[in-house]
Image (cartoon, rainbow, N blue to C red):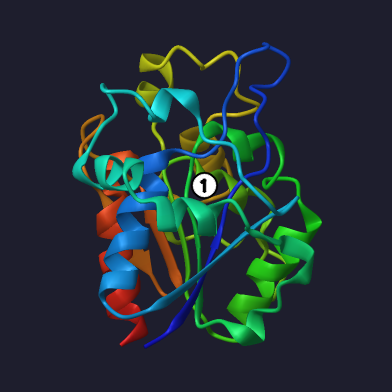
Amino acid sequence: MKNILFVLTSNDAMGSTGHKTGFWVEEFAAPYYALTEAGHNVTLASPKGGQPPIDPNSDTEDAATEATKRFGEDEATKKILAKTHKLETIDQKDYDAVFYPGGHGLLWDLVESETSKGLIESFLSHKKPIAFVCHAPAILKNISDEDGNPLIKGKNVTGFTNGEEDAVQLTDVVPFLIEDMMKEKGGNYSKVGDWQPYALEDGLLITGQNPASSEKVAELLMKKLK
């Protein structure tokens, strides 16, 4: 049994568009259930603590999966989610791994968060796995290795594709495109067809392409923790 930290966004605004965002339900729910059912302890945190915002587009019939339907009826997990710990109170020594669910919200808070950056680098320096799915790999933009180089330089990585961002018509809204950023930072970026499951492991780093990749990321994380 391992202790795994989930870090969720506290941001509910899509830049200055007036549209709401947050975290993507499937990217939280599928890994949460996979990990807890395997006997692991999951602790939830966010920059502001308390209830993290749910992206309304992830809570619709179109976005529904078995995991999201289960979450919709799971009052016990909703109560836990409503009381996330403040990120600044978290110490990596209490956990065996960290996982970041995606959703557009984090592009405006966790990407630039010095608290999050320090936490991720602390996990790495203590040889603990770090995992990200969909938009969460955007957080790797500001993460460096021990030599001060971009962490993803030369690493096999994936994340939300330019095509997927275009399909949801947010190419001109997001601060940057994840696929482009990963290539610019020297990452060995790869992808499969839009909306298809795809996840990669490279050392301590695990990344997944899109919401459908959430469970694959959880599987790779569990294998890593054995």
The residue most toward the front is: 75
Please tell me whether mark 1 sits on a helix, a strand or a loop: helix
Q: In this view, does 70 lie to the left or right of 171?
A: left
Q: Which amino acid does label 1 sit on?
A: Ala
Where does residue 224 sit, x and y in percent of width and height? 34, 79
Q: Quadrant of residue 225?
A: bottom left
Judge from the rendering whether residue 210 lies leftward or rightward of residue 193; answer left or right.
right
Q: To which residue does mark 1 refer?
A: 136
Q: Classify 122 as above or below 15.
A: below
Residue positioned 52% across, 39% down in the render: 23
Q: Where is residue 220 in the image (x, y as percent from the top left)?
A: 29, 68
The answer to which of 203 and 214 lies nearer the viewer is 214
Residue at figure coordinates x 69%, y 69% from the top left: 119
Figure quadrant of the C terminus: bottom left
Residue 91 showing in the rendered view: yes
For residue 195, above or below residue 29: above
